[in-house]
């Protein structure tokens, strides 16, 4: 069942939207031999203000995706093996190939993103942003309480 304009926002509609949009991204990533976790991890390395250590990346990606640290470490090994990340002493840096992959994926997903997000009134996007930020804060607080 697909959400409609009259469907109230809840965990299910949020999940449906997330997985539909993620499916578009994963379709593009698959063509380039990359996974969603690899893309998120590589993006974290590219956007870091200073070259991160492997532990820094594990912490950041875990905070973002709530993925298992062991899975993130496997992903780091995959990115290193593919030459998308390179070791620089105790730090990891994105290679030119890693930066190029992110640029190509962004360019290939841009038209679909424009169709997905285009035409939504700015006030609706602002309201959705506020609600999603609140849901994120509350869910993270619940997760922290469960982990305590």
Image (spheres, rainbow, N blue to C red):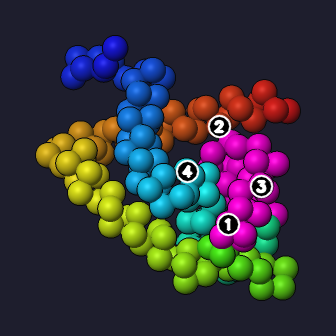
Which is nearer the N-term, disc 3 or disc 4?
A: 4
Which is nearer the N-term, disc 3 or disc 2?
A: 3
Q: How far is disc 1 from disc 4 in space, using C-alphas? A: 12 Å
Q: Residue 144 location, x and y as percent?
A: 75, 35
Q: How far is disc 2 from disc 1 in space, using C-alphas? A: 28 Å
Of badges 3 and 2, nearer the viewer stands 3
Residue positioned 85% across, 33% down in the render: 148
Q: How far is disc 2 from disc 4 in space, using C-alphas? A: 21 Å
- Tell me the number on the disc at residue 140: 2
Query: How would you rate the neighbour count of disc 4 (Cα within 10 Å): few for under 14, some for 14-19, many for 20 or more?
Result: some
Assess whether residue 77 is covered by the magenta stretch. Answer: yes
Q: Which residues are magenta?
A: 55-82
Secondary structure under the numbered disc 3 in the rendered image = helix
Residue for badge 4: 36
Residue for badge 1: 79
Q: Is residue 22 above or below residue 50?
A: above
């Amino acid at each position: 069942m697909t959400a409609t304009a009259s469907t109230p926002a809840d965990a299910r509609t949020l999940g449906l939207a997330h997985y539909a949009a993620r499916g578009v991204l994963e379709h593009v990533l698959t063509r380039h031999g990359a996974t969603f976790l690899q893309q998120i991890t590589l993006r974290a390395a590219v956007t870091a203000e200073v070259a991160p250590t492997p532990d820094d990346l594990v912490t950041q990606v875990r905070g973002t995706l709530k993925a298992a640290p062991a899975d993130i470490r496997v992903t780091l090994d995959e990115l290193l093996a593919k030459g998308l990340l390179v070791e620089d002493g105790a730090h990891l840096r994105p290679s030119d190939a890693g930066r190029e992959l992110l640029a190509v994926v962004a360019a290939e997903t841009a038209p679909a993103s424009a169709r997905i997000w285009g035409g939504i009134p700015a006030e609706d996007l602002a309201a959705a942003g506020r609600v999603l930020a609140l849901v994120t804060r509350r869910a993270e607080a619940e997760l922290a309480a469960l982990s305590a």
